Amino acid sequence: MSEPQVVRHADAEELAGSVALRLVNMIVQAEAEKRPFHLVLTGGGIGIATLAALRDRAAESNVNWSHVHLWWGDERFLPDKDPERNETQACEALIDAIDVPPHQVHPMPASDGMDGDQVEHAATRYARELTTAARGQGPVPQFDVCLLGVGPDAHVASLFPGLSHVREDGASVTAVHDSPKPPPQRVTLTFPSIRSAREVWLLASGESKAEAVRLGLAGTDVDRAPVSGARGAEKTVFWVDEAAASLI
Ligand SMILES: O=C1O[C@H](COP(=O)(O)O)[C@@H](O)[C@H](O)[C@H]1O
């Protein structure tokens, strides 16, 4: 696992623009190297702002999306098109505006999908989809970048402080029944999946995230601060604005 680096920007807009620019460069580089690019998306305020910035920067650079695969780090288990779903928000901010092949967009199941309201089955279905895409190389494909928002309570994805899922190491994806942040039912990647990503990028904007950022960098116990468990295989970057960096 990699040691975290910190990249600071003045505010949320600069932060989102900078992350988007770095992503555009990596997507272009993967294309030049003729390899797929697997990107894990996040929800949340700065997460969705970053996707909107990525849409704009990618349009300016005329990015080719044909080799890009989009996955999610977590999802709120709600009906398809619900405005609170991370997928719905990502579609509005980015996906509806780009030419990524539809079969390379991998949303987590909705609560009115094939598994109905069975969130455990939905998690199992997503784990299978990941394994299929990994083509025998492991439980999940080689994620190039895993984007993660950071909650004020120091959660990442849907791994919340004090919940047992934080310690899940036998599955790539797990169902959450008792999220303290609504909705209570969620689907989330587990830490082994997150840590298998080449690069894990934590996005934090605003004063309400300052303590979580401090705990995440201090390596606090993951049961108290799950953000501490989010590390990439090759690189871990905390992308923060000045307000989120105010305690480090
Ligand atoms: O519920 C969630 O919250 C976090 C953070 O959201 P924020 O609005 O406080 O930035 C997000 O990263 C996660 O994907 C989402 O499901």
Image (cartoon, rainbow, N blue to C red):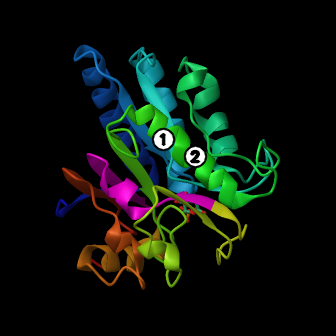
Q: Distance between the residues labelled 1 and 2?
A: 6 Å
Label 1: which residue?
A: 130
- Left or right of 137: which side holds 11? right
- 83 or 71: nearer the viewer: 71
- 212 or 68: nearer the viewer: 68
Magenta stretch contains residue 199: yes
Q: In this view, does 98 lie above or below 200?
A: above
Report helix, strand or loop for mark 1: helix
- Left or right of 199: which side holds 191? right
In this view of the protein, can residue 30 be seen by the observer?
yes
Q: Residue furthest front?
A: 136
Image quadrant assignment for residue 240: bottom left
Amino acid type, mark 2: Tyr
Quadrant that contains the N terminus: bottom left
Are discs 1 and 2 less than 8 Å apart at CB? yes
Q: Position of residue 42 (x, y in %)?
A: 51, 50
Q: Residue at coordinates 53% horizontally, 80% vertically from top-left?
A: 163
| Quarter of the render that holds ligand 1 | bottom right
Amino acid type, mark 1: Leu
- 10 Å crowding of disc 1: few (<14), some (14-19), many (20+): many
Label 2: which residue?
A: 126
Q: Residue at coordinates 25% horizontally, 23% vertically from top-left?
A: 29
Q: Residue at coordinates 42% horizontally, 15% vertically from top-left?
A: 64
Q: Where is residue 248 in the image (x, y as percent from the top left)?
A: 26, 76
Residue span colored magenta: 187-205
Q: How many labels does the image show?
A: 2
In this view of the protein, can residue 152 be seen by the observer?
no
- 10 Å crowding of disc 2: few (<14), some (14-19), many (20+): many
